[in-house]
Amino acid sequence: MPRAGSSLGAWVAALVALCRPQRVHGLLLLAPAVDISERHLANLTSAQRQHALQTGLVPLHSPYVSSAPAAGGATDAPAAAACPEPGAIMLGLPFFAQGAALLVLGPQQQALAQNEDEQGWLQRWPGIAEVAAAALSAGLPPPPERLPALCRVPRVHVMHGDEDDVVPLEAALGLFAAMCTGRVAPGLSTLSALAAAVPGASLEEQEVVASGGGDGVEDRVIMTRCSGTEDLGSVLWVVHGGDHRLSSCGELQHMRALLLELLGR
């Protein structure tokens, strides 16, 4: 049975495949935020880390979070106090502790603090070790076995927009390269760099045309299809101009086609 997920849901889908390899024969990962907690940790400033240790909360900026006050000028005072940065949502430190325990690709070098005194700062928060231990009770394989297990999923489609403003394209490029080669390849930022890192990779531009709804306007979506060698079942679809939502008519039509393929229909 295939599994599908978008953003953090794609990370969850990958974890399900690792926990139940006999029951998952395909994955559809949309704008996958796999191991995204490491990327957020790497981008925190020293001041944000100190604030996190004091409050247990970390600000995460998103273009989909409004910083405007509620209608009539009313504001939520408790929420404003807990979220001092406009346009941000607040994540609890347990999210990052769970994320560290559930990494698929493993800790990345960019997530390590430059100052040795700041390394391991998350472990100073009370109760964080217990949260991480609880996350490991789901039956996942040990960290060194996770990427090889993901590489054994027979068929994987990854779909990502090249204008994703929440999860950068390089995250999808790194994930796809790791699934094709069995090795983590940080720093991939372009399709040409990806093609050079994956032996036998090919790039092909494709177009999807879908009806835009009741008005009959066509929605044209241009994508680059990247695949490895024929014996590898992973395919990356990079949507030109696509953002994190991937919700246009053409994008949704392509998702449907990929899911039907995974279902064997």
Image: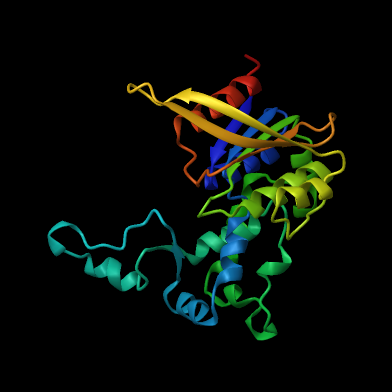
In front of the other: 56 or 238: 238
The quarter of the picture where the C terminus appears is top right
Q: Is residue 68 left or right of residue 158?
A: left
Q: Report whether residue 237 is seen.
A: yes
Residue 116: x and y in percent read: 70, 83
Q: Quadrant of residue 73?
A: bottom left
Picture layout, residue 200 above or below residue 93: above
Residue at point 61%, 69% (across, down) = 42
**Colour theme:** rainbow
Residue 34: x and y in percent read: 62, 50
Residue 161: x and y in percent read: 56, 44
Give the tally of numbered discs: 0
Q: Report whether residue 24 is seen.
A: no
Residue at point 77%, 31% (across, down) = 233
In front of the other: 150 or 195: 195
Q: Is residue 96 left or right of residue 229?
A: left
In the rendered image, the residue lying farthest to the left is 72
In front of the other: 163 or 166: 163
Picture layout, residue 85 above or below residue 186: below
In front of the other: 245 or 18: 245
Q: Quadrant of residue 119?
A: bottom right
Q: Quadrant of residue 100?
A: bottom right
Picture layout, residue 24 above or below residue 48: above
Residue 257: x and y in percent read: 58, 22
In the rendered image, the residue lying farthest to the top is 265
Residue at point 78%, 56% (across, down) = 185
